[in-house]
Amino acid sequence: GAGVSQSPRYKVAKRGQDVALRCDPISGHVSLFWYQQALGQGPEFLTYFQNEAQLDKSGLPSDRFFAERPEGSVSTLKIQRTQQEDSAVYLCASSLGGDRAVVAAFFGQGTRLTVV
Amino acid sequence: QKEVEQNSGPLSVPEGAIASLNCTYSDRGSQSFFWYRQYSGKSPELIMSIYSNGDKEDGRFTAQLNKASQYVSLLIRDSQPSDSATYLCAVNDGSNYQLIWGAGTKLIIKP
């Protein structure tokens, strides 16, 4: 596609439910980022993939959060046993390059997760 | 803890004037600096990057970096109502893939 695509756009989950958020990056983009953005705040880094390799997962807030990108294109962020504090917008971004000075160049429209 | 600070605003500027947005960062080792624009309910959009001291111009936008003062700014000339958005500053120290973000400054351009 022309841009980064995320689905679903909105997700309401009951506390304790597992959710899976999908990101389809721009074709050919090596770098893929997941960010979490709370209302009125800047995004917070969750994890980074370079192709299929997860090179940095230090931002994942707990072991309930898991991300994968098995074929180096589509990525899935999974949250197990959702809690109310997980409510936020989850942003995916991709970039063409894979060097260390990489920047999150193109963002998807985000998935707004509400845990009730 | 590495921090990026921005005035939350709102900053109100008349149409046609220069809007000046400021950002300070705590990590002296920071190497890469970025400005993003985020419209309400939308995702961030990268508008400028700067890596060395001085000014970098791109159309109506100018980014200014002063590493000694740990300060980066964004100037928007000839401000338009369509520039009304939240502007986010983000910083990378070059040792990893993480951007540290400020909370953003809300800019309002008054017609």
Image (cartoon, coloured by chain):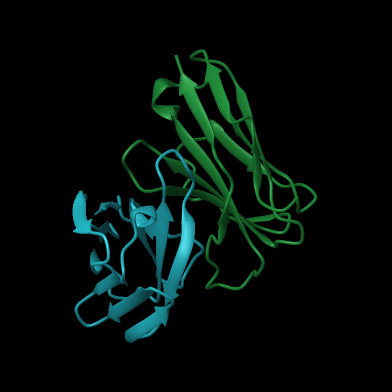
Chain colours: A green, B cyan
Estimate the x, y position of residue A54 in percent, counting from the top left. 64, 54
Question: Which residue appears at 54% of the width and 50% of the height?
Answer: A47
Which residue is at a point 74% across and 46% down the rendered structure image? A74
Q: Is residue A80 visible?
A: no
Q: Is residue A34 left or right of residue B99?
A: right
Judge whether B23 appears above or below A114 on screen. Answer: below
A21 versus A106 height, above or below: above
Q: Is residue A74 above or below residue A18?
A: below
Image quarter (top left, top right, bottom left or bottom right) of the N terminus of chain B = bottom left
Q: Report the front residue among B65 and B77.
A: B77
| Residue A80 in which image quadrant | top right
- Between B10 and A38, the residue placed more toward the observer is B10
* Residue A41: quarter of image: top left
- Residue B101: % across, % down: 36, 56
Q: Residue at coordinates 33% horizontally, 52% vertically from top-left?
A: B84
Q: Position of residue B16 (x, y in %)?
A: 27, 66
B101 sits left or right of A76 in the view? left
Instruction: Answer whether residue B13 is visible to the viewer in this image.
Output: yes
Q: How many marks?
A: 0
Farthest residue to the front: give it. B111
Residue drawn where x is 60% and y is 21% of the image: A18
Q: Nearer the viewer, residue A71 or B15?
A: B15
